[in-house]
Every structure is written in C-alpha cells, then in structure tokens.
Amino acid sequence: MTATPISRSPSAPVAATGPSGAAAGPATPSGPLAWFASEVDPQAASERSARFPKTGTEWLRFALVALQLALAAWVIDQFQIESRAFSRLFVLCGGGALVHALLPVRYRLAFFALLSFGAFPVVIGVVNAAWTIAIGLGLLALCHLPVSFRMRVALLVGAGAGLVVLRADWLHAPWPSAIWPVVGSLFMFRLIVYLYDRRHGGKPRSIWETVSYFFLLPNVCLPLFPVVDYATYRNRYYAEDAWQCSQTGLRWISRGLVHLLFYRLIYYYGVLAPSEVAGAGDIFRFTVTTFGLYLRVSGIFHMVVGMLRLFGFGLPETHFLYFESANANDFWRRANIYWKDFMQKVFFMPAYFKLRRRGETRAFVLATAWVVFNTWWLHSYQWFWLRSRFPLKWQDGFFWSVIGVVMVWNTLRDRRDVRARGRRVTGPGGWLGRAARVVATFLAIAFLWSLWTCETLTGWLAMWRTIGSDTEPATPPGTALAIVAFVFIVLVGGAAAARWFTDTGLAGDSARAFARGLTVTTGTLAGLLVLGTPAVYGALGDRISSMVQSLRVARLNRLDAEKLQRGYYEDLLDVDRFNSELWLAYKSKPRDWLELHETKALRPTDDFLLTELVPDSVAPYQGATLRTNRFGMRDREYELAKPANTWRAVLLGASIVMGSGVENEQTFEAILEESLNARGPGAPERRYEILNYSVGGYSPMQRLWAFEHKALEFRPDAAIYVAHEKEDYRLSRHLAAAHQRRLTLPYEELRWIQEEAGIDESMSAEAFDLRMQPFTRRIIDWTFRRFVATCRANGVRPLWVFLPTLEMTGKPKDVAWLTTLAREAGCDVIELFDVYDGQDLLEIRLADWDYHPNLLGHRIIADRLFQELTARPELLRAP
Amino acid sequence: MNIQNIRQTVRDHILKEFLRDESPGVLTDTTPLISAGVLDSISTIKLASFLEEHFKIEFKAHEVSPSHLDTVAAIADTLARKLSQPKK
C-alpha cells in the first residue's frame, strides 16, 4: 500500500493548523496601508505559494487558473446558470481572484472583503446594498461592544427580535423588502457560529476577517448558502498550497455546474405533479425526481465553496456522494456536511458533554434527538428570514422524526461497533452488500423525501392509490424502465466507484495533484461548452438537440410556469417551501408590483364578463401606468364612428395583448398601429385603427362576450382574436368563477353542455372544475365558431392569432389542436409560435417574477405581426 | 511525557481503533482526521473519551472539534497544553 494521504473524502485538506489559526503575528506595515493589513505569517504563506508569482511554474499555474475561470464564466453564461446577476458576479469573482493572487498576502483579506462589498451594489443596487451593509455592520458592532459576552448576546437577541417584527411586517421597515432574503442569508446562522467561536476561540486577524466572513462574496446572489463555520474559515486560510486550493475550488465549481445542469434536466423533464401520477412507474419517477431536485442545493454549495477557495480559504466540501449513502447516518454525514458540522458543534457536543455524567447512551440519544429537533425548527427559522413565513408543517415534523429515530438507532449500533467503520469494504461480496445498502437507503430516503416535500397528505396518498388503476400513466412503460435502470446503474456503479473517489490523488499539493485537478476541470468545462454549442448539439438528433437547447435557457418548468401564471390572477404567493425556482422568481418582487385586480383600473361587472377596465382611469401597474380611454379600452381615444378611408380592427386578448407592465404607447398593438399608418398598404392616405379591447385574465368566452357586447358597436373591419397556450385553463377558471357567482350561462349551447356534465348550482368550485374539464375543448370549439358566425353576420373579418406566452414550455404540436379548431371554425389564422426564436428570454421579459413581454418583447411581436399582415394584404381588407 | 510520546500514543490508538486496515505510513502528524471524514462525531467522542481516560484530563464541548483534534499534531498540542495546566 502506498503512503497516499488517507481520506474518506477527495477534498481532504493537506495541512492543518493549530487552534490558533494559520499564522502567528508578523510585523505589520506602517502608514495608511496598515489599516488594510491582516496578520498572516509571510514566511508560512510564502511556503504555500501565497505570494506574487515568481517562478515560471507559478506563472503557468496563474495562467491555467485564469483559463479555467474564463471557461467556467463562459459555461455559466452559455447555460444561463442561476441568473444574469450571478453571471456578472462570477466574472467579478474570477477577475477579483486573479488580482487577489498578485497582491501581497497581508492585503488579500481586505481586498476580498472590499470586493465582496463591491458586489452588493452590482447585484442588488446601491440603495439595497447600502441598507444591507448598514444593517450588517450594526449587528457586527453589537457583537464587538466592550461589554460582557452575556450582554452582547442579550443585545443581539433584542436586535434580532426587532428584525423579526419588521420581517413579519408587524411594523413597516424603512428599507426595501427585497433585501430581507439577503440580510437573512448573511446573518441568520453565521451570527450564531461567530458568537460561539468568539466565545471559545481566538480573536480575528483583523476587522477584514470578520467583515469578509459575514459578507461572503457569492452570498449576495445565492440566498441558499452553506453554513460556513467561522473557525474553519479562519483556520483554513492559506493552510494549504494556494494554487492547489484554487485548483480544488475550480474543480468544485465545475462539479457544481454539472449538478446544476442535471438538476435542470430533472426539473424540466422529470418532475410530475402528484395529481399527474398514475401507477408504479409514475410513482418511481415522482419519488426519485423529487429527491433529485436536491442537486440544485449541492450544485450551488459546490459553486460557493469553490469560489471561496479561489481566495485562499481552504474550506472542505459541502456534499460528498450523498446519493451513495449506505444508511441514514451516512446520509446525514454526506449531504450538507456544513449543516451537520454546525449541528454537531453548536448543539450535539454541548448537549452530550452536559449529559454524559448520567450515562453515555442516554447522552447520545438525547443529544441526537436535540440535533434533530433543532434541525427541524431551524429549517422553518431559515424560511422565515428568506420568505417571511414560519412554516411549521406536519411533513417536516414527520420527516425529521423518522430520520431522528433511525439515526438514534444507528448511533447506538455504531457506538457498539466503532471499529467496524474503520474497515475498508473489500471483495465482491463486500461491494455487493454495500451496493444493496446504498440502493435501499436511496429508495427509503426518496420515499420519505416525497412525503416531506408534498403539499398535502391527501395528494400524496392519492398518488399511491393509483397503483393498479386503469388511468393512463404519464410515463410510458419504456421510459419508466429506463429511469429505473438509470437510477440503479448510478447507485450500484457509484458504490463500486466510491473506492476510486476516496483513494485518488486529487487531494494533496503536489504538481501531479494539480495536473489531475486541472485535467478533470478543464475537461468538464470544455465538454459542457462543446455540448452547448448549437453546431454540436444540432447534430445529435431532434430529441437531444431540443433537450440541450432547452438546458441553455433558465426558465420555470411546465408546472411552475402554470403556478406563476395562476399567480397573476389568484394571489398565488404562498409558493411551496421547496419550490426554490418559483420562490427565487417571487423574492425580488417589489411591494408596489400590483396585479391587475389590485389596481383601481379593474372593476367587477354583474354579467358574464365578470370584470372590465374602468373608463378614463389612470393607475400605476407593474412599473408602468395603465390608462384607459372613455370606452374602457387600454388605448388612445377613438371616435365611435369609423373615419373615412380607415381600416379598423378590434383586438381581443388577455394580459400580453393588454400590455401588462408596459406603457400604453409601448404595447404591440400601439406599435403595430403606428407602423401600419406609416408603412402599411395605402399609407399614409389610408388610415389604420386597432382598438384594444383586451383585459388581463380574459378567457376565450370573455373575449367573445366583450366582442359581441362592446367592440361590435365600433363597426370594425376585422376582429383579431389573440389566443395563447392556456386557453383551456383560462376558460375553466372563468366558468368556475361564474358558477361561484351563481351566474346563468348566457348561451344556450353552453347550458346544454353544463347539463350534460351534470352540473348543479350547489356544486363546489373544485367539483365544477372536475365535471367541466372534459368539455373545455368542446366549449372552445363552440366559442371560435360563435366568434366567426358573429363576425360574418356583421361583415367583420375573423382573424385568429396564436401568440405564445413567454412561459410556454411545450412545442407547437402540443397546441396544434387550437389552430385546427380556429381554422375549422373559419378564421384567417396567423401563427406566431416562433416569434421569440433566437431571442434571449431573459432580455424580453418584464422581470424575474413576471414573464410578460417587456417593451423589446412587444416590439418583436409588433414587427412580426406587421410582416404577417402586410405579406397577406387581403387580411387588411374588409371581408 | 514529551510531545513525541504523546503523538505516538495518539497515533497508535487511531490506527488501532479507526484505521484498522490502513498501513501505519498513511497516518502522518498532519493527516486531517475530522475534516477529511476519517473521524465522525461518534469516533471523535470515542477518541476524546480515550484521551481523557489515558491522560487524565477533561475536554470541554468546544474542544472536541477540528480546531483541536483534526490531526495527530493538533491533538498532541492540545494534550500538551492541557497537561501543562495546573489541575483544578
């Protein structure tokens, strides 16, 4: 056996420092620069290459680190990892790391702290940054007041209580609400760790160490952040070779990117809603993909620690092959290791040492239970700071209770046989046994995880009752088998490969270790870049090509897009506590970002329309001003009588067409009208008028009703019905709302359908929905036919436009039925499925929390419609 | 007891109890134990109990941490410091 440094983890640090940290006190510089200096032993640091590169090898390593940083930044940009802000932050981090490597070591901490401060205004804006930094420095000042430790703790608890009052909105905070997740993420756990370590450890090297610990650079963009241990942070500072430290960081960054892309694959293509599950195949898919979503956390954490290692902090890894855990305790030790260490340090050890005089077994059991209890409520505490709610859900209690019982049992067993855990697994039998334990643990945790993360027990139980039912599964049998095979291959293969992972020479500061890390990282990053190149993935066949193309875009998946869209109408802000994507979309939403029903521009009606815009109203609406004319259109003023030599159309649509989030003159309707009047057939003599009768949230039948009861009196030449992919969903919501208000359906044909569906007045909205769902396509068909009939009876050309929302995740074929119905009804059809092709969706949407098109998006739509209409001039004539 | 003797005692115990299948050469004075996952919380407590009993000292909760017990060298330093302190 060779004398390779042993480790159970590939990230094993190679050197360690004593309790006092990395360095003894050197002579500090004098003059103004002294204020920026931190105590680091220059001799020791120099031995670890934490110095200005001198040798050719050091310059080569510097260049190779720079190259890998550039590749990583490119991958992050190419795949839109996390957010645009993160992409900018990573460039700042990479550039900063290179400058940092050229600085004298004693100034590096100050530089890192100032760089971290500098990231705040870049990411969250100057005002938010100023508030965040001010609150943070205030808390730090309390930690360092020259009073007793108890008094400082009491003051901090008081300050914390004040912040709780403001966070819960019991009192209005003077700062923007957008800073809460950032402030919470910076201080909610690190203050606890910092106080604990200050109580028991040495003093910081300098103020920069403290400040940089709290304002850690990547944290401003990533509120889901590992609980970095203060003692480790300070003790591991330049405790290993600086180049190797950076190289390991880069390897973890590339690993994080792989995790995040796998997560995205699962998020886009794997997850099912419990209501969609039918049969064993779907259940397997549901449970493993729900667990698989945890890759987002491990991916982000790998990236975070990787980025910190670029600045000399030799932090250990946060996750270690956690899908390969062989029992519950093993999982606890491998998944979110920083959390485990935090619990062990702050809760387990103090409890154990307090209780051990009364018997070791009792102390073990009670200390473990204490850890489980604190893990449970601290999860809710975390969500309180991030999302202002304190979700004490039964699922959390159940999940942590089961984990707790199993952990206690395992702990007692482990205590009896602690030696056995020091033995290596050998021989085929040993590996087979381990593989079996890994598979069993994975399935058990995935099962528990699915219960933990489900929204309701009823939904979860209903899912299991579908086994053996006749309902058609969402997952075809072949795909289900492929998922089972993939999971088993990964788990069993991983168990066999674990030895390689634990024994390779990736750790260590030798040139060989650096070279191996470099090879793995560069290979991974280059592979991702090549895969993400259109010329490459375009040659991989339609299916893979479209999959890779979709992975390049950060967006909500089908289920979350539906939830976001529902949020526009139904106040759906209580996103599930595990839905990090939707939460991230919502978290920055300003308080004054009102939905249409929250403005004074919308009012209820007594008829089937349910709501309408208030004539002559002016209201702030989603960052713009919504103005209506005297007829209640979101448009300029028109005369009732059509002017001579004018082509007049009425536009019937929902929120996109109404222009959510843009000014009146910025809607695609206004831009199109202007373009037609400037460059349309016969212009400028011939005039064009497009009257916008669209209202946010209008269903197909509301559009029809508005046409028949309002728009027709303007004697238009054309009626333009604008459809999107959620026509059936909007229709069912509209009919359910009308049913709730006990409105009699105004069309006879609809009343027949209602009768056929077995609807009665006393029915709940849910039951009504269920009964009507099979009939929605038939009602839409009827709506289109009625629209055409009304047009023909009034000499109006029926035009039907399909305009996808920015949330549309399906393919044109998924909504082909709508186009078919419109054509068969007799509409002239314009399909704009590809209107956003080639566009960066992040650039054309209003905001992270609102996927309506912005001004650029409206221009693109208007230009395309102009092309379509002028290419078919007959559409611009009366029928 | 000098520092070398302390290190040897600690090393022998770790090899015997926690690294039974490893060659003695793999455990150097600076080999990370807790931070590399060689010792988990139970093993760490077991090690601390042994050290308390063998060296007639007492650990406090915050001392059973990587700062004090991550390497043979760190353990020996901690023990030497404790042994040099007057008994209460």
Image: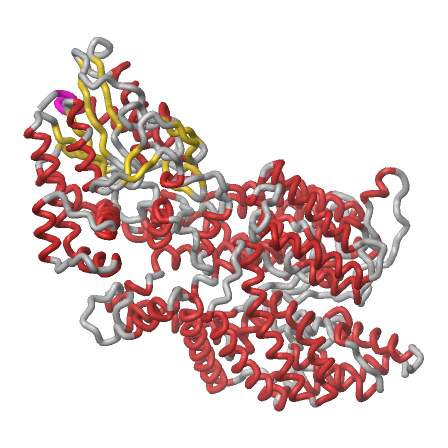
Decide: is A502 above or below A562.
Answer: below
- The image shows a total of numbered marks equal to 0
Which residue is drawn at the image coordinates 47% and 67% (left, top)? A393
Which residue is at the front of the view, A129 or A861?
A: A129
Residue A14 pos. (x, y %): 70, 65
Residue A301 pos. (x, y %): 56, 58
Which residue is at the front of the view, A226 or A194?
A: A194
Decide: is B65 above or below A674.
Answer: below
- Give the residues drawn in magenta, as a range: A872-877
Can I make out residue A253 in this image? no
Judge whether residue A362 is colored magenta: no
Which residue is drawn at the image coordinates 54% and 68% (left, top)? A335
Q: Answer with left or right where residue A664 lies relative to residue A497.
A: left
Q: Answer with left or right where residue A612 lies relative to residue A597.
A: left
Which residue is drawn at the image coordinates 66% and 77% (left, top)? B41
Which residue is at the front of the view, A224 or A84?
A: A224
Residue extending furthest toward the top? A685
Can I make out residue A513 in this image? yes
What type of secondary structure mainly makes up the magenta span?
helix
The C terminus of chain A is located in which quarter? top left
